[in-house]
Amino acid sequence: MTEFVVAPPPVPSVAVSGSAERFPVRRIFCVGRNYAAHAREMGNDPDREPPFFFAKPADAVVDSGVEIPYPPLTENLHHEIELVVAIGRGGFRISRASAFDHVWGYAVGIDLTRRDLQDEAKALRRPWDWSKGFDRSAPCGPLTRAAQWRTPDKGRIWLAVDGETRQDADLAELIWPVEDIVAICSEGMELQPGDLIFTGTPAGVGAIKPGQRATGGIDGLEGIDIRVGSTPS
Ligand code: MN
């Protein structure tokens, strides 16, 4: 057995709906600009851009129901409600036709974003890591097994802050549907069991402030509910 020089890190994981078992997280990939109205609200042309990906560390994932301390270095923390795809079977250059054979399940996640740092990164042509991949930046609700849901080609996706609806759209509006996202992601990386893909957010992103609560959902999946705590001193 390998002896490590410091304690090996715990395996990050996501809850499984209706089960005590958990889904181990290997990597977190995220799609940028996958709903036309959100691309427009961010000042981009949705018609001309193929999907692009960024990543968060696996241990950025946290369960629904937790309080997330307001992260450092930002005064503009944004919520982005997203359909999360969990990969159960790996593959390189997966075909669109076989994409769903690689999906273990689906969940509702929030791609938390330090928008002020992202705006600065875009302006200065710097990486997005600090704006997207900070601690606890990937809250994710319980996974529903793919076999127990349906093809994720439609269904309401929404998020509310303190009960006020901010994001309200339909999965049918995804520019690149799930099978395309899985296929295209696997062209750039060999997907592995345990990978999560956050599939992009619809319009209506906005700030969530200390003390506020975000609730969100997708028709047919377990919802997500997080509270943002105060700024760490
Ligand atoms: Mn996002």
Image (cartoon, rainbow, N blue to C red):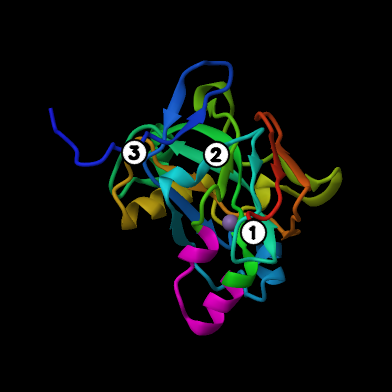
The amino acid type, in three-letter code, at marker 3 is Pro
Q: Secondary structure at mark 2?
A: strand
Of the residues under marks 1 and 3, which one precedes in the sequence? 3
Q: Residue at x 49, y 57 (%)?
A: 133
Q: CA distance from mark 2 to mark 3?
A: 15 Å
Mark 1 belongs to which amino acid?
Answer: Tyr
Kindly check if marks 1 and 2 are in contact, taking CB atoms under 8 A apart as contact.
no
* Residue identifier under label 3: 9
User: Residue under circle 2?
Assistant: 62
Q: Residue furthest front?
A: 233
- Which range of residues does the magenta coloring cover? 118-132
**What secondary structure is the magenta-colored segment mainly?**
helix
The three-letter amino acid code for the residue at tag 2 is Val
Specify the label residue 35 is tagged with.
Answer: 1
**Residue 122 vs residue 202, the one in the foreground:** 122
Say which element carries label 1: loop
In depth, the one of 218 and 135 nearer the eye is 135
